[in-house]
Image: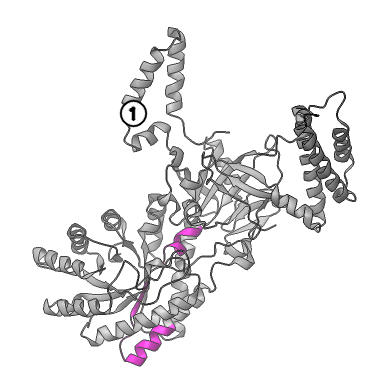
Amino acid sequence: MDYGLNIWGENNFFIDNDRLRINYANQPALIDIVKNLEAQGIKGPILLRFPHLIRKQINSLYQNFNQAIKEFDYKGEFKAVFPLKVNQFPTFVKPLIKIAKNYNYGLEAGSKAELILAMTYNNKNYPITINGFKDREMIRLAFIAGFMGYNVTITIEGLNELNSILEVSREYKKVPVFIGIRIRLHTSGVGIWAKSGGYESKFGLNSTEIIEAVEILKKENLIDKIKMIHFHIGSQINDIGPLKKAIREAGNIYADLRKMGSVNLSAINIGGGLAIEYSQWEHKRDRNYSIREFSNDVVYLLKEIASKKNVPMPDIYTESGRFIASPSTVLIAPVIELFSQEYNEKALRLKEKNPDLIEELLDLFKLINETNYIEYFHDALDHFESLLTLFDLGIIDLTDRSNAEILVNLIIKKAIVFATYRGFKNKELKAINEKIQEKYLANFSIFQSLPDFWGLKQRFPLMPITKLNINPNRSATIWDITCDSDGEIPFNKKTPLYLHDVDLNKENYYLAFFLVGAYQEILGMKHNLFSYTNEAVITFDENGNYKIDFLERTQKIRDILIDLDYEIDEIEHLLKSKIKKSSLNGEEQKELLGELFILLNDTVYLKD
């Protein structure tokens, strides 16, 4: 089973016999990287970053747009910025900045803190766009960035922001930035992230406000500062139709603004929203277009409008963040328990004299094979119903019931193995398999590492990184280690996940979650005080060998408490005083205190 790798994988990984490998350089297996990290004491969930996949995505974006520009003889240029809101972590941003040098690739900021990051790390003269609601202090920061030599465009979200820009410009007596106008289009995207577009959006100026903004800038002799119009119809645009409609709408606004005297208006920023394919199932694909179609449509439509309206073809900006960031990050979570593992032959507590039905179940378990498994499966279910009735009547005891549960579970597991060989032709057995899913307890927190699944039910590609030469036969529900019933990825018949039946006493089993590089870490919460996971940046040397370029360990318990503004000295003092007031003797108190303070410096994720 390839877990839909050909649908979502973009040729970044491949299966080699029993393991998943990275399709780059010397093609290391993910399991080998994990074992390397475990040898260094890194246990539990691990976030792996692959900067070469950032480079691949940026290159794909530029290559496809530049190819479309050449093919359609387009006179404008393609430019892009990365929206920092998608991933602000330094282990992502710093490699991104290094790669960006080769592409004139800039940054987008939506807050003062993000703008400080852009001013600090962005490559000189590369574009910085500033979106979102702004106060005068944020506009002052933008002016400072302009004075530093950056190519800065402040996108106004309303007329009040334009007035603030004018007030700050009077303070500095210069305007070292360009002005962009966020336009509120009639068009909106589709799907769960569509609210940032359309008339109901909280962002942008309507037609009347756009005209008023132009008139204000003319009056202030600053009309030459309008450089860009900007729109955004939503994140993860899964249908190309609304984008094409938005391009036509924005293109005509651009042409009219040029004719109204905005002589330096030279760019249309189409925002973000370029989708990636999260689906592992052919019938549930997340998008209906390719990056090639996306870039061709944008370039062709803008050329058509500019030519028709007799205006210069604008430069094309994108702020595609999810497309750039998502593929570069993989979450590895060890499975630490299977909840059917208590149903094993060793757990049987058979008596010298067992009830007849228990003896019959024992025979079914010993004699079941590939020719009789359906019949024996049905017999086991009938016997189990009878035994439960006998227990309710007080005729058999709890030990007998336990033996019945174990034997029936073992018979079903054997039947599932035989059914797997036959392609699950028996619908009833398949339904039973789906009903009694194996519960895989994985050492991670959904709330911390996959908040979009918890909040939006966004599925992420998921697969084991070993045993891939064996057909998985257990319908799987994934449980995280939080004490919250929402901390699970339930089995879904429409998008089924099957995993392997493994003995965790004999082997380790790791699940990998893919395409988690956008939004997940920054939106992740410390539910149950589970902090960010261990993190490693994986790069490759000139010989193609991988190396662990950077390693960030998860927080200690004391650090998490400090983050929540607890006084760690107070906590230690109170714990110490409570132990001293206990009935333990002095030596016992001393030993307990030492152990307690060691545990305060432990990590919150499980060790085994």
Of residues 521 and 382, the one drawn nearer to the viewer in this rendering: 382
Q: Amino acid at mark 1?
A: Ile
Q: Position of residue 186 (x, y in %)?
A: 36, 77
Answer with left or right where residue 548 lies relative to residue 150: right
Q: Which stretch appears magenta? A: 300-327
Q: Residues within 10 Å of mark 1 (few under 14, many from 20)?
A: some
Q: Position of residue 563 (x, y in %)?
A: 35, 38
Of residues 29 and 375, the one drawn nearer to the viewer in this rendering: 375
Which of the image's four quarters has the N terminus? bottom right
Of residues 567 and 146, the one drawn nearer to the viewer in this rendering: 567
Q: Residue at x 78, y 54 (%)?
A: 428
Q: Position of residue 514 (x, y in %)?
A: 54, 55
Compared with 593, 247 (above or below) is below
Quadrant of the image occupied by residue 506: top right
**Tag 1 residue:** 568
Residue 561 counted in the magenta span: no
